[in-house]
Image (cartoon, coloured by chain):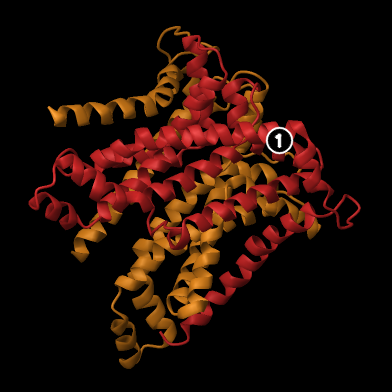
Chain colours: A orange, B red
Amino acid sequence: MKKLFAKCYIWLLLAMLYAPLLFIAVFSFTESRVLGSWTGFSTKLYQNLFTGNVSGGAALISAVENTLLIALIAAAFSTLLGTVAAIGIFNLKGRAKRTMQFLNNIPMINPDIITGVSLFLLFVFLKFSQGYVTVVLAHITFCTPYVVLSVMPKLSQMNPNIYEAALDLGATPGQALWKVLVPELRPGMISGFMMAFTMSLDDFAVTFFTRGTIGLDTLSTYIYADARKGGLTPELRPLMTLIFLLVLVLLIIINLRSSRTKNVIE
Amino acid sequence: MVKRSNWSIPYLVFMLVFVVLPLLLIVLYAFQDSAGHFTFSNITHFFSDSDSLSTFAVSIEVAIENTLICILLGYPAAWILANRKYNRSAVTVVLFLMPMWINALMRTLATAELFNMLGIALGKGTLLFGMVYDFLPFMIYPIYTTLMKMDKSYAEAAEDLGAAPWTVFWKITVPLSLPGVMSGVLMVFMPTVSTFAISEFLTNNKIKLFGTIIQENINSSMWNYGAALAFIMLVIIGITTLFQGSEHGEVEGGLI
């Protein structure tokens, strides 16, 4: 009885959380321009999306390209910077270590709007013209802490002797790094990369403040402008549905990976 | 791995430029007029401007209500998810956390469209509903992780010593999970105050939150006043973080 009640509660909450997403997904399979009126099953919106046959199509396509490219570059740089930083922080001690960890926490505690406004002021202050580069730098800023946090546990799980052993057996520090350390850290780096990638894809506020006035749009700023004009472009429905699915698949992969590594350790 | 500690230097430099300096700039701009002279007028303007003050009050009110509803709905959910008797599936947990990773703007637009189709008028009620919907996963996640990490033997000991299930829950489980609730509050409260765009879409521009006025000022080149508003928000974040004491930033490796 209790168990049934618990299950019902969980599934009711999930139904509430997913209702709007399902609503969008269902209505991505009908042609109607107005959301909520069903005019028969059709995959026309998907076809339009993939052939670029959308009102304002070029702008939407370039927004999608920008989003993916920015996410890839930002995730790659964050993974590099974050991994090197994690190795450094792991080897620090006492106050220096705590200071670095505190600094690393700041971008995670700050609401997006604070990160966005503060970086906007930075670029204004440095008279750095805003556009692609500033958006990427801003994304690296809020993504790297998550990489650091996902690489750190791998460092503490690792047996430090194997690195020393490689050196004793004649490996150069470079070889020991590349052949011993990196393979040990790889699972953490990959999870960190994927997390950074999804964080960057999702971002709206920080991009909004750092993209400048050159008309650079990512998907979220495009959707924002589109919705303010009144009513969503119908082709955004299939696009949003595809993004929901992509994020779900990425998350399940990240989750399976981390539970698999946990099992190996146990 | 001797001397590897200097590998933290590039990141230290990066954070000084992109995290510390920008925050100092918020403070600097907040206390300057548009000509660059030191002034308190931005701050005093906020406290004498009834529009800003009432927006601020509304934001705090919505944030408190949102946080309370998220605790009321989220705590039982986290408890059930963390309890092996009721839930053994990691997929249910992922399903609860998944919305955290989807653009809040998209989810909000979807919610607003759903309200439109159902013929529900946009206003305070829909704003709260949408906010709860946006932030509930951020409350469930930290509570869930603290409950999972909790040493179960305390509860078992209490049971063995004759405590009723309800007593065990109130005297053992709840106090031990408070750090999780506190992180949840941190992840819900300030972000609610600071959202922009979300409140516009959920209320059809009827209700403005604090984030919206920051954005409006920055976008209309009133940088100094915008920075002052952001500074006020930073002060509140500082205070709420201090309240958390040593628990602050308890976000551990691998968010999932």
Q: Residue at x 54, y 19 (%)?
A: A234
Q: Quadrant of the N terminus of chain B?
A: bottom left
Residue A50 in view: no
| Residue A54, horizontal then vertical, whole percent | 60, 23
Q: Is residue A53 positioned above or below B163 on the image? A: above
Q: Please tell me whether residue A155 is drawn above or below residue A138 in the rendered image.
A: below
Within 10 angstroms of label 1, few (less than 14), some, or many (20 or more) residues? some
Front position in the image: A172 or A221 = A221
Q: Quadrant of residue A64?
A: top right
Q: Along the horizontal axis of the image, is B39 left or right of A223?
A: right
Q: Chain of mark 1?
A: B
Picture coordinates of residue A193, whole percent (x, y)? 45, 56
Rendered location of residue A256, percent (x, y): 27, 50
Residue under the image location 56 percent in, 21 percent down: B124
On screen, residue B79 versus residue B28, left or right, reads: left
Which is nearer the eye, B61 or A258? B61
**Residue type beneath disc 1:** Leu
**Rendered image quadrant of residue B214:** top right
Residue A78 in view here = yes
Left or right side of B175 for B88? left
Residue at 38%, 29% (x, y): give it. A17
Residue B179 percent location from the top left of the image: 37, 53
Q: Residue furthest right?
A: B35
Residue designated by label 1 = B53
| Element class at badge 1 | helix
Task: State the residue at coordinates (48%, 33%).
Answer: B66
Drawn side of residue B209 relative to residue A17, left or right: right
- Number of labels in the image equals 1
Residue A264 higher or lower than B145, as above or below: below
